[in-house]
Image (spheres, helix red, strand yellow):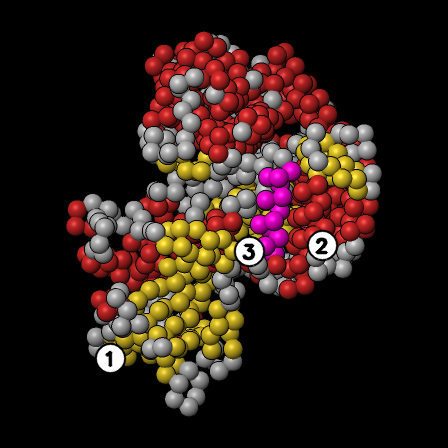
């Protein structure tokens, strides 16, 4: 047992209590006794309902399993399957037409379209980097990635490569031509950018080879700033800003014909500071670390000192950016992304707080209370949300009843914190099949609070596999991606969101680009997200945010939403159409290759989760391609193996043997890490290896196929071993 203190009938970890009382409550008009008594009342009122929701999940899963055992895959009787799901309450009655009623939403949510970052708030440096990713250098993003070819004379090298730099100028000018075209001349031909302030309104001066040039859209010139010989010219397009940094004395500016030293793009408009999938927080000490960083972001005091290239650096939140408008008035733009916080779902409990009978409470209840409490500091400052809102992303909810439950919890938190009703907004992750099937009803349940709906296609695939476990063997992962049910799921999210009035009022989002080093591919493919009508989409890094921002200049998302407004919404028959695999269509080598690919991915992710407490990282796959991995990707791989094991496509001996071989591969991939603990030397006693193996061997019995129960237990075991 830990060191607990009594608070309003609860047993609260002493470190957590000290954080709440000595840090989170400091400076707020909320008394400690009022917080704990309100929180204890919420636990007493809502924990029984939380447990009931989880029991309903289990009951429905059992009934679905029984149906598949009797009827086979969905394709054998699609109408009967839908009728059955309605009979057990899995599919609920759809509400009539309505529009969401959420108010006090910031423009980054309602009217400005752009990239969205997701970052583990447990890592202060990453959290700060993501918050500061509101603005990013286009030159750096192009020069430092494969957005520009990295072979031959364009290879980056250790020193600055002027030929690569010249290609950056070409690509950057092409972007300017798209977003801010000139009349009669291209940006690559410009010899001077300047601002004239000779008596009247400020004018943008642009010289081309044959004389002065003008913006095709003069109103795109939004402001300027001048200091120490540097002119910063502010342009605006599709609600997003770009800054031309004119500095002929700069090392880069000297090489540009117009002295353009950089183009700084407004990039990550919003950032999810994550307490969930990308975080490994398994006890009270871990949770205090998570909460402390979130508090620091909300007070503005968070900073992190680290060494880079042999030098000590301290990172803090960026200040706002100031300019002078053409008419002489002041222009202030936020220097940071709008920060949202993702709580955990309804499943997990935490021993950081015990109820009156000594039982761990719902971790989601604790997250709701403490993250909202921390965010109250920003309600006083209004440095993050200018409208006085708190944005909580709620993941892994199954259907409208669970969405309503989360909304009611937020309402209870508002009561004991003394906040106006609906201060706390909810972001609905459309990542579980029961939510996908009832999305309109889910939005209706949260119609006064909802600020976004977002497709989490990774978790969604994991849930599809687990829900249909008894239907038959699942397809290989790459084949699943091409199935029509996934496109139907993505389309339904956008079309239902538009029909429910989210356009111009709330976010309709898309999921993560999982290859952080493949920026050329991202530039080619991820434009599909705004084209589909999504006004935000997830990216894995600040650099990716800057490059993805280009897409929101190329696509008017609100026009795309208007174009799609009258499209027919795909039906449930398509949503439930994932076929089963005929194992005879795969060779033994195909099966083994898929097994190895899944096992290697699980091991590469889990070893860092268990041994280092890293919840999200770039993990090399079996071909040494770095992929962003978190619990959602792990859920897919573990459920895929569990499914094949359940249906006899592979045997347990084959799974164990494959994991053992792949452990040696993963050990080799981590050979350069001095703190790494090898798994293959003694797999039987490696907690990380045993955790990874358990995810596959015990996958069918895990609630909804989630990885958290096993990962949390094994990480706690590892920490206990010291």
Q: Earlier in the sequence, mark 2 or mark 3?
A: 2
- Mark 2 vs mark 1, foreground winner is 2
Q: Are marks 2 and 1 in contact (CB under 8 Å)?
A: no
Which residue corresponds to the image point at 36% horizontal and 75% vertical from the top-left? 231
The residue that disc 1 covers is: 211
For marks 2 and 1, give the CA distance: 62 Å
Q: What is the count of numbered marks?
A: 3
Q: Depth check: give the residue in front, 412 or 90.
A: 412
- Mark 3 vs mark 1, foreground winner is 3
Q: Earlier in the sequence, mark 2 or mark 1?
A: 2
Q: Bounds of the magenta span?
A: 284-298
For marks 3 and 1, give the CA distance: 50 Å
Tell me if residue 471 comes above or below residue 563 in the rendering: above
Q: Earlier in the sequence, mark 3 or mark 1?
A: 1
Q: Using a 10 Å C-alpha cutoff, classify the residue at mark 3 as few (fewer than 14 neighbours), some (14 to 19) or many (20 or more).
A: some
The residue that disc 3 covers is: 302
Q: Position of residue 526 (x, y in %)?
A: 41, 46
Q: Residue furthest bottom?
A: 199
Name the quadrant containing residue 383.
bottom right
Which residue corresponds to the image point at 39% horizontal and 77% vertical from the top-left? 227
Q: Using a 10 Å C-alpha cutoff, classify the residue at mark 1 as few (fewer than 14 neighbours), some (14 to 19) or many (20 or more).
A: few
Q: Depth check: give the residue in front, 5 or 360.
A: 5
Which residue corresponds to the image point at 43% horizontal and 11% vertical from the top-left? 654
Q: Secondary structure at mark 3?
A: loop
The residue that disc 2 covers is: 25
Which residue corresponds to the image point at 71% horizontal and 21% vertical from the top-left? 59
Q: Position of residue 481 (x, y in %)?
A: 44, 31
Is 176 included in the stretch rendered in magenta?
A: no
Q: Are marks 3 and 1 in contact (CB under 8 Å)?
A: no
């Amino acid at each position: 047992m830990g060191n607990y203190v009594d608070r309003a009938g609860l047993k609260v970890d002493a470190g957590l209590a000290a954080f709440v009382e000595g840090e989170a409550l400091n400076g707020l008009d909320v008394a400690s006794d009022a917080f704990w008594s309100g929180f204890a009342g919420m636990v007493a009122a809502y924990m029984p309902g939380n447990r009931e929701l989880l029991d309903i999940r289990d009951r429905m899963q059992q009934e679905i399993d029984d149906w598949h055992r009797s009827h086979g895959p969905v394709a054998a009787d699609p109408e009967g399957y839908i009728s059955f799901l309605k009979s057990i309450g899995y599919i609920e009655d759809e509400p009539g037409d309505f529009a969401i009623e959420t108010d006090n939403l910031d423009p980054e949510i309602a009217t400005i379209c752009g990239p969205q970052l997701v970052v583990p708030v447990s890592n202060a440096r990453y959290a700060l980097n993501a918050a500061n990713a509101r603005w990013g250098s286009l030159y750096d993003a192009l020069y430092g990635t494969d957005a520009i070819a990295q072979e031959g004379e364009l290879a980056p090298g250790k020193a600055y490569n002027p030929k690569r730099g010249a290609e950056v100028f070409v690509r950057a000018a092409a972007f300017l031509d798209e977003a801010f075209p000139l009349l009669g001349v291209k940006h690559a031909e410009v010899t001077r950018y300047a601002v004239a302030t000779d008596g009247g309104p400020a004018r943008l001066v642009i010289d081309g080879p044959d004389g002065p040039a003008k913006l095709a859209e003069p109103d795109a010139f939004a402001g300027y700033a001048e200091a120490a010989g540097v002119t910063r010219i502010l342009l605006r397009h599709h609600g997003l800003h770009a800054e031309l940094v004119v500095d002929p004395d700069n090392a880069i500016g000297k090489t540009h014909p117009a002295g353009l030293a950089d183009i700084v793009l407004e990039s990550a408009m919003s950032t999810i500071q994550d307490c969930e999938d990308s975080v490994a927080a398994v006890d009270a000490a871990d949770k205090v670390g998570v909460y402390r960083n979130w508090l620091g972001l909300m007070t503005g005091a968070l900073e992190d000192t680290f060494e880079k290239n042999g030098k000590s650096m301290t990172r803090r939140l960026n200040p706002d950016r100031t300019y002078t408008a053409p008419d002489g008035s002041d222009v202030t733009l936020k220097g940071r992304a709008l920060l949202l916080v993702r709580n955990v779902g309804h499943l997990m409990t935490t021993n950081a707080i015990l109820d009156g009978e000594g039982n761990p409470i719902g971790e989601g209840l604790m997250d709701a209370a403490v993250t909202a409490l921390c965010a109250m500091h920003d309600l006083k400052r209004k440095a993050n949300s200018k409208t006085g809102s708190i944005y909580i992303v709620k993941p892994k909810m199954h259907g409208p009843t669970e969405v309503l439950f989360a909304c009611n919890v937020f309402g209870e938190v508002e009561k004991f914190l003394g906040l106006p009703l609906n201060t706390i907004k909810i972001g609905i992750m459309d990542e579980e099949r029961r939510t996908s099937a009832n999305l309109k009803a889910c939005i209706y349940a949260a119609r006064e609070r909802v600020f976004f709906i977002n497709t989490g296609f990774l978790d969604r695939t994991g849930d599809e596999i687990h829900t249909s476990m008894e239907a038959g063997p699942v397809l290989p992962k790459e084949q699943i991606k091409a199935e029509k049910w996934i496109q139907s799921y993505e389309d339904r999210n956008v079309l239902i969101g538009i029909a429910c009035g989210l356009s111009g009022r709330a976010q309709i989002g898309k999921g993560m680009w999982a290859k952080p080093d493949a920026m050329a591919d991202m530039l080619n493919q991820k434009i599909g997200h705004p084209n589909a009508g999504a006004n935000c989409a997830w990216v894995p890094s600040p650099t990716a945010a800057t490059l993805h921002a280009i897409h929101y200049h190329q696509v008017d998302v609100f026009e795309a939403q208007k174009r799609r407004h009258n499209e027919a919404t795909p039906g449930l028959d398509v949503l439930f159409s994932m076929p089963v695999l005929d194992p005879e269509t795969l060779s033994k080598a195909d099966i083994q290759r898929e097994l190895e690919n899944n096992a290697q991915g699980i091991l590469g992710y889990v070893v860092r989760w268990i041994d280092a407490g890293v919840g999200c990282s770039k993990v090399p796959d079996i071909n040494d391609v770095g992929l962003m991995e978190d619990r959602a990707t792990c859920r897919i791989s573990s459920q895929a193996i569990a499914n094949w094991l359940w249906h006899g496509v592979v045997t347990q001996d084959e799974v164990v043997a494959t994991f053992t071989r792949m452990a040696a591969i993963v050990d080799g991939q981590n050979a350069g890490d001095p703190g790494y603990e090898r798994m293959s030397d003694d797999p039987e006693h490696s907690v990380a290896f045993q955790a990874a193996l358990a995810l596959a061997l015990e996958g069918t019995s895990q609630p909804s196929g989630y990885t958290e129960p096993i990962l949390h237990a094994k990480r706690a075991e590892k920490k206990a071993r010291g």
